Image (cartoon, rainbow, N blue to C red):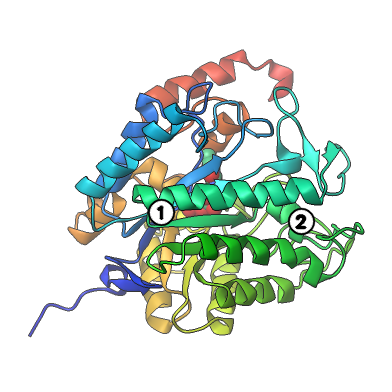
């Protein structure tokens, strides 16, 4: 008799590809590129650790395709028209393919839109929000954006990446288009059909440019966020949550060739407690599980559903959740239980992957006691918000120092 393996250890088909286990590394912007958006030594070291860490899938962080409008000063850039930039990507992808052929490498493509930082870039918007705004974009702008995504996906497919992740979440450009608040009269505004049109055109055109289905198309979707009229709300100004459109969006993308979805919640422009539950908002982790289950229930059995927002669970101790035995309130307990029950298919690791990129390997080797558990202090997020290189400011010394410097720079009235 073979030794029984836990659900988290089981391989899983994602579209035409096989992930060797049920761990997926979330895209995590760490803004450590240079001022031209190229990888730094620190970027390369981060990804080396993540690939060595043993997850079945690594999704690379939000990569911008242009530097005109962006949220982070040192965001990583993919510019297929710049030979220097292409060369760096080609070398990176080739090396990862050679060294880690059994880890799926997916690249998240991103546009910040209205959340671009107007102190160093151009803010563009679909329909201005109070306190944000920017230049109103038109159909031609969106057509060019689609074109740039298609070119990037084609380049990535030819250079060894296993897929692209389309970012329909967290209040960035595509989320700005999808949300009911976008009731502007234009090709991509008003009715759900109009707002989803962009996502569908994008998915179809990427698939047409890369017809080989072994190249995966997937999406990270905010099933709902905390902004009235935001994604998953039932009207342009409504505070009422209704995930009907988010489910319809995923079904429409699935019909056009998307083979996985990463569940997420929230909007980076509104607050973090939904997107990144911490000790004080720990109960939101169950909202993530519930929404992942809702997607699972509504999508085709062969579509892979990945649950996010789970870092707060840790080993069940000191996670802000009470009323349950720690052993039955941990990342591994809920990951295994929910996969076994068919609530979702994989678990995604965000902040936890900064705290310990080797967690999957340690789990698979039964070295759980060696795991550095994320404390969900959100210092990584504070560094990111301050445009600093970011990483775990609890376990990783250079980031502890950066965080201390950041705090010293702040005036007492900022705290
Ligand atoms: C520092 C930081 C950077 C992030 N960068 C990205 C990103 O590039 N793309 C994305 O979709 N989400 C990003 N997120 C959100 C995470 O991927 C994830 O959805 C969130 O942290 C919740 O998962 P967790 O509880 O495992 O941390 C980021 C979050 C943090 C804290």
Q: Secondary structure at mark 1?
A: helix
Q: Is residue 142 above or below residue 246?
A: above
Q: Residue at x 51, y 39 (%)?
A: 29
| Residue 140 x/y as whole percent | 78, 48
Give the residue at mark 1. 157
Mark on residue 79? none
| Residue 70 x/y as whole percent | 65, 34
Image quadrant where one finds the C terminus: top right
Q: Residue at x 80, y 60 (%)?
A: 188
C-alpha span from label 1 to label 2:
26 Å
- Which label's residue is closer to the chain start, 1 or 2? 1
Residue 190, by quadrant, is bottom right
- Residue nearer the viewer, 405 or 389: 389
Q: Residue at x 35, y 61 (%)?
A: 23
- Residue nearer the viewer, 404 or 34: 34
| Residue 378 x/y as whole percent | 54, 40
Q: Is residue 276 visible?
A: no
124 relative position to 57: left or right:
right
Kindly report which numbered mark, 1 or 2, lies closer to the viewer in this rendering.
1
Mark on residue 177? 2
Q: Is residue 114 visible?
A: yes
| Residue 285 x/y as whole percent | 55, 62
- Residue nearer the viewer, 235 or 316: 235
């Amino acid at each position: 008799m073979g030794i029984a393996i836990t659900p988290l250890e089981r391989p899983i088909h994602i579209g035409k590809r096989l992930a060797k286990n049920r761990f997926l590394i979330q895209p995590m912007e760490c803004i450590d590129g240079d001022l031209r958006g190229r990888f730094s030594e620190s970027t390369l070291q981060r990804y080396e650790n993540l690939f060595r860490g043993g997850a079945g899938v690594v999704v690379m962080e939000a990569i911008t395709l242009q530097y005109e409008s962006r949220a982070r000063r040192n965001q990583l850039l993919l510019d297929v028209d710049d030979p220097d930039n292409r060369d760096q990507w080609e070398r990176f992808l080739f090396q990862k393919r050679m060294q880690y052929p059994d880890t799926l490498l997916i690249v998240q493509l991103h546009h910040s839109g209205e959340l671009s930082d107007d102190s160093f870039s151009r803010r563009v918007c679909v329909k201005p929000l109070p306190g944000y705004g920017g230049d109103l974009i038109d159909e031609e702008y969106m057509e060019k954006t689609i074109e740039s995504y298609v070119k990037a996906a084609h380049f990535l497919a030819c250079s060894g990446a296993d897929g692209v992740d389309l970012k329909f979440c967290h209040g960035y450009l595509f989320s700005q288009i999808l949300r009911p608040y976008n009731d502007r009269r234009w090709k991509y505004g008003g009715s759900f059909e109009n707002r989803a049109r962009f996502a569908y055109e994008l998915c179809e055109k990427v698939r047409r440019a890369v017809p080989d289905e072994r190249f995966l198309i997937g999406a990270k979707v905010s099933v709902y966020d905390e902004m009235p009229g935001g994604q998953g709300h039932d009207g342009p100004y409504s505070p009422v949550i209704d995930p009907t459109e988010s489910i319809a969006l995923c079904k429409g993308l699935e019909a056009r060739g998307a083979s996985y979805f990463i569940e997420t919640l929230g909007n980076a422009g509104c607050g973090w407690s939904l997107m990144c539950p911490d000790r004080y908002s720990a109960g939101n982790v169950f909202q993530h599980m519930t929404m992942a289950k809702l997607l699972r229930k509504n999508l085709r059995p062969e579509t892979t559903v990945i649950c996010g927002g789970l870092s707060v669970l840790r080993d069940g101790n000191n996670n802000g959740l009470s009323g349950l035995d720690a052993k039955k309130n941990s990342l591994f307990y809920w990951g295994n239980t929910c996969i076994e029950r068919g609530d979702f298919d994989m678990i995604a690791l965000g902040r936890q992957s900064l705290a310990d990129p080797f967690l999957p390997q340690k789990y698979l080797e039964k070295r759980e006691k060696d795991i550095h558990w994320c404390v969900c202090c959100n210092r990584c997020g504070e560094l990111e918000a301050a445009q600093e290189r970011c990483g775990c400011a609890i376990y990783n010394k250079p980031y502890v120092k950066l965080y201390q410097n950041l705090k010293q720079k702040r005036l007492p009235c900022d705290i």
